[in-house]
Image (cartoon, rainbow, N blue to C red):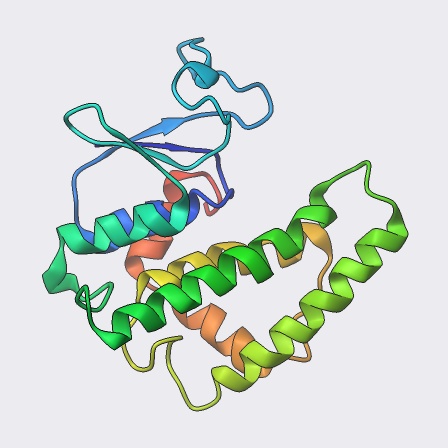
Amino acid sequence: MKLYYSPGACSLSPHIALREAGLAFEPVLASTKTHQLENGADYYGINPLGYVPLLELDDGTHLREGPVIVQYIADLAPTKNLAPANGTLPRYRLQEWLNFIGTEMHKGFSPLFNPNMPEEAKTIAKTRLKSRYEWLDGQLDGKQFLMGDQFSVADGYLFTITNWVKPTGFDLTPYPNVRAWHERVGARPAVQEAMKAEGLLK
């Protein structure tokens, strides 16, 4: 398998999942700025949408969209318990989390990275993110991870998004449960490996 990624982007989520699952894969750097690969190839030729992540399976099939990719990875390594079994209510709870992270958190940060976005719009975006992190803080009260005591691919996704607080200047100080959870996830060996591989840690 090949994972097309850009350092620190949302593709870090499936990168973490692959390492947690212990699966063999080739990371392929795909710049989200130039849309070129290191060999000079046009990334749009691989993914016409131009964004990461994209997972290329051994038979050449392409999977797009992070929440789908991480579930696929989890299902390839069921003994790692990165996702509950398909068809169970816990699996739908996982999908509930992945959808929330994708629509409310991931897209919530997007305006803060846009240099053309007016400051007023960025303030509105931060206000909305504050309400979401306040809710998350309550959800994490007394829990190790989003799904309880078991790390899941949803934790890897939210960790990736929460890393964006630093470049965007978002303050996590009011959310002690989120901060403790973020440290806990960040200390996992597979997470450390993924971040080091992307040049995010020394």
Image location of residue 131, percent across then percent down: 68, 75
Q: Quadrant of the C terminus?
A: top left
Residue 178, above or below 87 = below
Can residue 186 be seen?
no
* Residue in the picture at 42% in, 61% down: 98
Most foreground residue, 14 or 166 = 14
Above or below residue 179? Residue 194 is above
Residue at the image point whose x is 61% and y is 52% from the top: 107
- Left or right: residue 46 versus residue 180 is left
Q: Which percent across, then down, holds residue 126?
A: 75, 62
147 lies left or right of 24: right
**What's the residue at 56%, 54% (across, down)?**
106
Query: What residue sits 37% from the left and 81% below the top?
Result: 144
Q: Position of residue 151 (x, y in %)?
A: 30, 70
The answer to whether 37 is drawn above or below residue 54 in the figure is above
Locate the N terminus by quadrant.
top left
Name above or below for residue 136 compared with residue 182: below
In x, y percent, where is residue 185? 40, 67
The residue at the far left in this view is 79
Q: Residue furthest top?
A: 40
- In the depicted view, which residue is nearer to us: 158 or 69? 69
Q: Is residue 70 visible from the viewing direction of this image?
A: yes
Report the number of discs: 0
Residue placed furthest toward the bottom? 142
